[in-house]
């Protein structure tokens, strides 16, 4: 009998890639989403509904869990929703899992590299201090602390993904926004601060990293998920323009400038590589070619 993997946020950007990776590893995948009809491999339930969530958990009885659900956009305007989804939702899930007759062999909770905030200690490793600069990052720090409350009862692994992208990501995010403009031949770009650096990972590599952690011997701990290479946002625009044959006209727009912008968000992935036998990451250019060709 194949083991069962439970994936929250299955209908989000990362969910389908995670489901495909888990299926490749031999799991039957059961997804949770807030909307849509329930079926044999999908349940519609709000993580804020503790009783309803508990019923689903008891029925599915997962062998491993990947918790992706939550609000993932830093600029989300509903602050209350950020804290409810990212903190209370995480607590309800972990609490429901403790009621199972047999605990899952691994529970992966996706946090965010935004917990590090802005610091001179770049690239960040897992021991770097956390200095959250916005509500999204604060909610992720709190969610990590919530997860740590359950480590005596559940084998919780926390991941801190840095920026990642790929086909299917909302154009509210930087890279797909530029790709969308390029594919439409729209040269004019209204953007915020471009004098920043980010460590971009291909979503397919991120899903592979999560799957590798689930199959590894690690039973707990925090792991950066990143390529270990940072890119200036202007260079990303230049690469997309080169690949698409588009010369962009960039206009600075205050609407897209964030207060407390982190100037450089780059990570050290040594701990992840040690746990996953040295997995490799695609170069960003390859990811951009994939997105432009989709």
Image: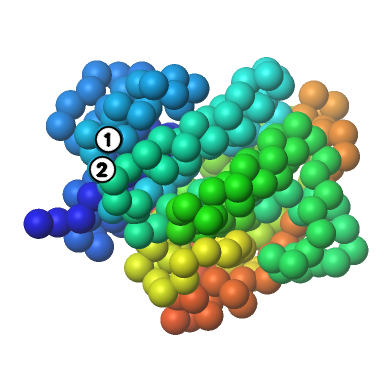
Q: Quadrant of residue 49?
A: top left
In contact (CB < 8 Å): disc 1 and disc 2: yes
Mark drawn on residue 292: none
In the image, taking residue 253 as reference, residue 58 lies left or right, namely left
In the image, taking residue 193 as reference, residue 187 lies left or right, namely left
The extreme left residue here reads: 1
For this rendering, which residue is in front, 64 or 103? Answer: 103
Mark drawn on residue 58: 1
> Secondary structure beneath disc 2?
loop
Name the residue rendered at 14%, 56% in the picture. Answer: 2
For this rendering, which residue is in front, 62 or 191? Answer: 62
Name the residue rendered at 68%, 53% in the picture. Answer: 113
- The quarter of the picture where the C terminus appears is top left
Residue 228: x, y in percent? 64, 70
Residue 40: x, y in percent? 15, 32
Name the residue rendered at 54%, 55% in the picture. Answer: 151
Residue 118: x, y in percent? 85, 52
Q: CA distance from mark 1 to mark 2?
A: 5 Å
- The quarter of the picture where the N terminus appears is bottom left
Residue 241: x, y in percent? 61, 50
For this rendering, which residue is in front, 193 or 265? Answer: 265
Mark 1 neighbour class, 10 Å CA radius: few under 14, some 14 to 19, many 20 or more: some
Q: Which residue is mark 2?
A: 61
> Secondary structure beneath disc 1?
helix
Q: Quadrant of residue 121?
A: bottom right
Name the residue rendered at 44%, 81% in the picture. Answer: 277
In the image, taking residue 104 as reference, residue 161 lies left or right, namely right
Residue 159 appears in the figure: yes
Task: Tell me: residue 131, above or below residue 33.
Answer: below
Task: Tell me: residue 207, above or below residue 253.
Answer: below
Residue 288 appears in the figure: no
């Amino acid at each position: 009998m194949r083991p069962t993997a439970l994936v929250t946020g299955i209908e989000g950007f990362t969910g389908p890639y995670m489901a495909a990776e888990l299926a490749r590893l031999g799991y039957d995948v059961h997804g949770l989403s807030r909307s849509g009809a329930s079926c044999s491999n999908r349940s519609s339930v709000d993580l804020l509904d503790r009783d309803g969530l508990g019923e689903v958990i008891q029925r599915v009885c997962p062998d491993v869990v990947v918790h992706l659900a939550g609000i993932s956009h830093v600029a989300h305007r509903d602050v209350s929703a950020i804290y409810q989804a990212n903190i209370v939702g995480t607590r309800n899930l972990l609490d429901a899992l403790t009621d199972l007759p047999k605990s899952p062999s691994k529970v992966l909770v996706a946090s965010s590299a935004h917990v590090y905030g802005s610091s001179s200690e770049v690239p960040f490793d897992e021991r770097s201090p956390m200095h959250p600069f916005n509500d999204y990052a604060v909610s992720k720090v709190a969610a990590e602390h919530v997860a740590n409350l359950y480590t005596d009862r559940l084998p919780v692994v926390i991941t801190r993904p840095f920026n990642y992208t790929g086909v299917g990501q909302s154009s509210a995010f930087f890279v797909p926004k530029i790709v969308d403009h390029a594919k439409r031949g729209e040269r004019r770009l209204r953007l915020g601060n471009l004098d920043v650096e980010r460590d971009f990972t291909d979503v397919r590599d991120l899903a592979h990293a999560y799957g590798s952690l689930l199959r590894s011997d690690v039973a707990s701990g925090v792991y950066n998920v990143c390529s270990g290479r940072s890119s200036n946002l202007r260079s990303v625009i230049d690469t997309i323009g080169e690949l698409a044959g588009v010369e962009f006209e960039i206009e600075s727009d205050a609407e897209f400038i964030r207060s407390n912008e982190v100037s450089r968000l780059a990570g050290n992935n040594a701990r992840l590589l040690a746990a996953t036998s040295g997995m490799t990451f695609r170069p960003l250019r390859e990811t951009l070619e994939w997105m432009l060709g989709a």
